[in-house]
Structures are given as C-alpha cells and as structure tokens.
Amino acid sequence: MAQSQKVISGSTSFNATLAEFSYNGKAQIYTKSDKHDNGKLTFTFYSDDFTKQGELTINPVEYEYYNKYEERAWKDGGYKGEWQVVNEDNGKSYADIIKLYLEDFDQSCDDFRNIYLSQTIFNSDDKYEYLMPVITTESESDQGDRDGDGNIDYRNTWTNAIMTGIQVVSETGAVIQTINFPNGFKSSNYSKNGADLIKINGKLYLSIEGKDANDSDAILLCSIGTTSGGGTSTRGDVNGDGVVNAADVVKVVDIISGN
Ligand SMILES: [Ca+2]
Ligand SMILES: [Ca+2]
C-alpha cells in the first residue's frame, strides 16, 4: 500500500474546513502558519494526498501596546526611596483572527475546535471568509503598598487589546459584514477563547464572552442566519430589514435579555 508523507515546516497544527460549511460539501485540509511573519498569517491548502493546492495570506490587525512598572526604592526600613522605573516596554502587536468552536446542539453537541475559515457560514459564495477582531486599546493600572506603611510604593500601567466588534472578511480582502458590539459590550479574551459558533434548529449564532457596559461578565449572542443553502434571505438579517447591521445584533440581545 502506497503511503503519503509530508513534512510541513512552519506550521503547527493540522486543520480542515468542515464539509458542512464548504461550497462543494467537501472538507479541505489546511495548515495555519506558526508565527506572524511581519504580521502576515498564512493558510496553506492541501489535497487529501497532501499536495499543496494554494495559499491564503492575510494581514492581522495591528495595535500598539505599552507596559510600565515603577516602584519606590528601599530606604530607611521601608519602600520610601525615589520612584524608579523597573520595566517599560512598548511596541506593536498583532491580534489573531478569531477561531470558532462549533457547538452543534442539533447533533452530538461535541465541539469542533479551531474553525478559522469557512465558505458558507456567512454567505453562499465559494470564497473563504474569516473573522477579524475590531480592536481598540484601553489603558489599565494598579498600585499598592508593599510595606504596609499606608503609602503607595508601586504602580503598574499597561494596555489591553479590547475587541469592540467583528469584521467578516472575504479571502479577497473585502469586508462583507461588520458587527459592531452593542450597548458597550466588549471582549478582551477573544484570542484565548475565540468565539462559539452555535447551531440550534439549523440556525447559526455567534456567542462571545466579554463584559457589558457595567463591567459585569456577559455573553453577546448574535444571529448569523441558517446553514441551508439556496435561500434568498440575507444571512444575519434578524430584523428582516434586508440589511445585516448592528440592529440585528441588538434585536437578538433584546430577545435574550427579555426586553
Ligand atoms: Ca463564502
Ligand atoms: Ca508603602
């Protein structure tokens, strides 16, 4: 029996698109590049016998980060000395694209991890789509009293990358849909947790963990339509006005919160 073998350098994990979200109903093997090469992220597609078929290179969102830690030096039996900067760092970082975890309540409910690319979740054409976070940065700080003398003797300032929306981007680079999070909702842990792609009764939803406007833990639920092909309705058009926009997100949120 002939064997196919292939060493794929620069890639960390095997992946594949899901057949149910592909244009021709077939899964497609791909790998995702290990590191951002000057910010670029490369997906490489392979046939079932590992023949390279093509690449998709995208430019992740770039943002500036900043960290600074200062403390008072030890003097006279306490942290009473001059303020000194222990660590200060700034530069550019890249926000990864959003990975989806499928939770299919119509089937086994087992989740399928790491869906980066799909063809038919967000529209019905044969192009791949992926999700880019809309990023803003917020400054945070804390301070404290290490020696308990009642006087502040250290302070820490840093920036957090906050996701305030999602862009659905075609492999052509065109933004085909922008979801602006409503009501002050924001998410800072998207890169670790990704987002859930939930399938219930044939309908698809995004579920994103984050904070509401009062800084309480919250999830944002967002309808993105059905998986059945051939329909004429606009995917994600919850309120039926023919346009997919933030109003659709708000409508779903209102339903969930019982307003
Ligand atoms: Ca498509
Ligand atoms: Ca102190």
Image (cartoon, rainbow, N blue to C red):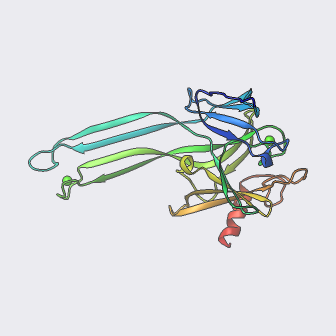
Say above or below: 259 vs 249: below
In this view, which residue lies farthest toward the front?
1
**Which quadrant would residue 247 be assigned to in this image?**
bottom right
Where residue 193 appears, x then y in whole percent? 56, 51
The N terminus lies in quadrant: top right
Nearer to us in this view, 89 or 20: 20
The C terminus lies in quadrant: bottom right
At horizontal 15% and vertical 45% (from top left) the residue drawn is 74
Where residue 49 appears, x then y in whole percent? 75, 31
At horizontal 66% and vertical 27% (from top left) the residue drawn is 6
Say above or below: 149 vs 24: below
In this view, which residue lies farthest toward the bottom?
258
Describe residue 219's horizontal placement relative to residue 26 as left or right: left
At horizontal 41% and vertical 49% (from top left) the residue drawn is 140
**Which quadrant would residue 186 be assigned to in this image?**
bottom right
Describe residue 151's horizontal placement relative to residue 26 as left or right: left
Where residue 233 appears, x then y in whole percent? 87, 54
**Which quadrant would residue 203 be assigned to in this image?**
bottom right
